[in-house]
Image (cartoon, rainbow, N blue to C red):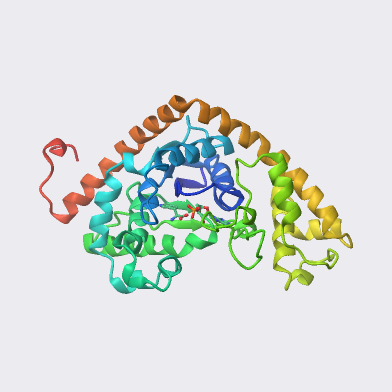
Amino acid sequence: MSAYQRVLSGVRPTGHIHLGNYLGAIRNWVKMAKNSKEQLFCIVDQHALTTAADSKNLSQNTRTIAAAYIACGIDPSESAIFAQSHVPAHTELSWYLNCFAPLGWLNRMTQFKDKAGKNKEGANLGLYAYPVLMAADILIYKATHVPVGEDQKQHVELARDLAGAFNNHANLKVFPLPEPIIEKNTARIMSLRDGLSKMSKSDLSDYSRIHLLDDPDIIALKIRKAKTDSDPIPGTIKELTDRPEASNLLGIYAALSDQSIETVCRNFEGQTFSSVKQELTDILISSLTPIREKMHYLLQNQDEIDKILYRGAKIANTLAEKNLREVREILGLIPRADQLGKL
Ligand code: AMP
Ligand code: TRP
């Protein structure tokens, strides 16, 4: 029996896909996909429009994320890989869910507060409604498990609340309550320049993150420049408490070498960061080289990526349209002509 019924997740095609996306999210998708009945991995191109729409690069960025999914080990013959905008049911369900989403719930969303910053009045409605579209991404497939990094936990919880609100209205268990799946050790990979802020696509400095497309010499340079402290590596995690940069680098090493941080601390105990950085560089290069090479191969064969996206969208549309019909009927909308008699 599969541990997970239906797994769904997504990444925004903005900026450079990075090590935090890989360790916090995509690597876990690959593990879960092996143990689930159905898996859908979306490139959320409509979400990308909520922050500084980059129309010139959006289609290329979308293909790059698709290439990253495949290169990281998502098998397109077993999982549906598709662009959000190719499945119009997401935005339709999102409207219906908007009508069940109290403003009070949305006002609590910390990502909106971070992204809107001080200029809340100037933020666009799409950014505000972002979590509802994300809930629709999940609920339109009746997904049960959503593997994400820590920063997305609140959004998945909102999706649960919206599922509950809709189920109450229908007096039926239409949607399962989706569960966020967060891998504790890699839930929050931090910036290489500041151990207190998250590694993020929107950080202005390329040196804050490792991109999945970085060449080995760039990786080596970024790790050489990564912020550390001057104390030697301690033998226990407890002694790492006030050393965010050290914890982050050792955490990345532990994740890539499939060891616990305890073991890594014990193995490096007493050494300085220069030797740890060398080993970290080596393991980053050996882990990321096959991914980078496969991404380059796919990006040179865009037809192949597009074929995968179209196939994924076909699977996704079939599932989504069926669930949308049910929702429309519950809401009392007149069935569309093409949906008559199909429920
Ligand atoms: P985004 O880059 O915001 O589209 O994020 C895509 C996925 O990667 C989401 O599941 C995020 O939670 C995850 N993620 C992004 N940045 C990090 C990070 N620094 N550490 C761990 N997970 C992350
Ligand atoms: N909001 C997510 C992020 O920024 C991306 C996302 C959109 C997503 N829809 C989703 C993740 C549905 C999981 C499930 O990372």
Q: At x 58% / y 49%, what residue is drawn?
A: 18
Give residue 321's position: percent from left, percent from top: 26, 41
Residue 187 against residue 113 in the figure, above or below: above
Label total for image: 0
4 or 251: which is nearer to us? 251
236 or 66: which is nearer to us? 66
Q: At x 22% / y 48%, what residue is drawn?
A: 326
Give residue 16's position: percent from left, percent from top: 53, 47
Dividing the image into 4 quarters, which one contains the C terminus?
top left
Q: At x 76% / y 69%, what residue is drawn?
A: 240
Give residue 22's position: percent from left, percent from top: 58, 47
Q: Quadrant of residue 128?
A: bottom left
Q: At x 38% / y 30%, what residue is drawn?
A: 311
Left or right, 226 with reference to 120: right
Q: Is residue 39 visible?
A: no
Left or right, 223 with reference to 62: right
Residue 315 against residue 241 in the figure, above or below: above
Q: Is residue 342 visible?
A: yes
Residue 162 against residue 342 in the figure, above or below: below
Most distant residue in the right direction: 270
295 or 266: which is nearer to us? 295
127 or 35: which is nearer to us? 127
Give residue 190's position: percent from left, percent from top: 63, 61
